[in-house]
Image (cartoon, helix red, strand yellow):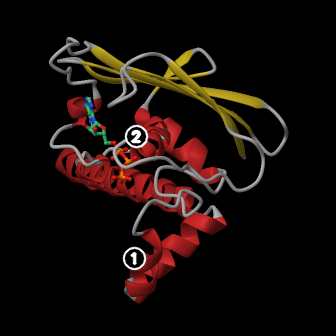
Amino acid sequence: MQISRLKLSGFKSFVEPAELRIEPGLTGVVGPNGCGKSNLLEAIRWVMGETSAKSMRSGGMEDVIFAGTSSRPERAFAEAVLHAQDDEGEELVVTRRIERGAGSAYRVNGSDVRAKDVALTFADAATGAHSPALVSQGKIAQVIAAKPAERRKMLEEAAGISGLHVRRKDAESKLRSTEANLARLEDLMAGLD
Ligand code: ATP
C-alpha cells in the first residue's frame, strides 16, 4: 500500500486545513521543536484507527481536536483524510472525524464503516496504526529494548498477518457463543424427552 496524501483540519496544531503529498520511498519530516512533526505521524496513526489516547500523547481522544490559543477559539471537530493506493492500484480514501461529545466516525471511499473495518483494511495491507513503517522519535531504541514477544508482534505487523489474529479472536468468540447455544438446546431437548 502506498500512502499518497494526507489532509488535516482541526487536528492538534493543524487548525487550518493542511494537505501533504507523500511521495514514494522513504519520507522524513524535519522542522524546529514543537512545529508539529509528531502530530503529523500521529494523524496518520489516528486515521488508521488508533484507539489508544495515550499513544496520541492525549488524556482522552477528544484532546486531538485543536484546543484553541489565546487568540483562536477551540475547534468543534478534527478530521483527517488519508489517500492511499492498494497493491492492485485501487484508490482508497479513508476519513476519520471526531466531534466533541460525539466520538469518532469513519468513512472508506465515501461509505460509513466501523473502526474495526478500517483497522483490518490496513492490517491486511501490512500497515496500520502500529506499523513499523511509521518510525516516531524513540522508536529505534524501543525496538532494540523490546522483549521477544513484543518483537514478534512487530514482525507480524510487518508481515501483514496481524489482521488474521483479530479475525481468529472474532471466530473464537463466535464459536464459544455457538457452543453455549448448543448446550442450552441440548438441555431444552432433554427436558422434552
Ligand atoms: P519536537 O521536535 O520537540 O518533538 P514536534 O515537531 O514533534 O516537536 P509536536 O509534538 O508534533 O512537535 O507538536 C507540539 C505542538 O502541538 C505543541 O505546540 C502543542 O501545543 C501543539 N498541540 C498538541 N495538541 C494540540 C491541540 N489539541 N490543540 C492545539 N495545539 C496542540
Quadrant assignment for ligand 1: top left
Q: Which mark is residue 36?
A: 2
Measured as percent of width and height from the top left, residue 191 is found at: 17, 48
Residue under label 1: 142
> Is 126 placed left or right of 174 in the picture?
right
Q: Quick one: SS at disc 2?
A: loop
Q: Which mark is residue 124?
A: none
Measured as percent of width and height from the top left, residue 92 is found at: 68, 29
Q: Please name the residue shown 32% across and 44% down the image.
A: 51
Residue type, numbered disc 1: Gln
Task: Measure how far apart labels 2 and 1 are at the Cα level.
Answer: 22 Å
> Is 141 placed left or right of 109 in the picture?
left
Measured as percent of width and height from the top left, residue 168 is found at: 48, 60
The correct choice, above or below, for 163 with respect to 48 in the image is: below
Q: Please name the residue shown 48% across and 16% down the image.
A: 17
The correct choice, above or below, for 192 with respect to 151 in the image is: above
Q: Quick one: SS at disc 1?
A: helix
Foreground of the two, 74 or 58: 74
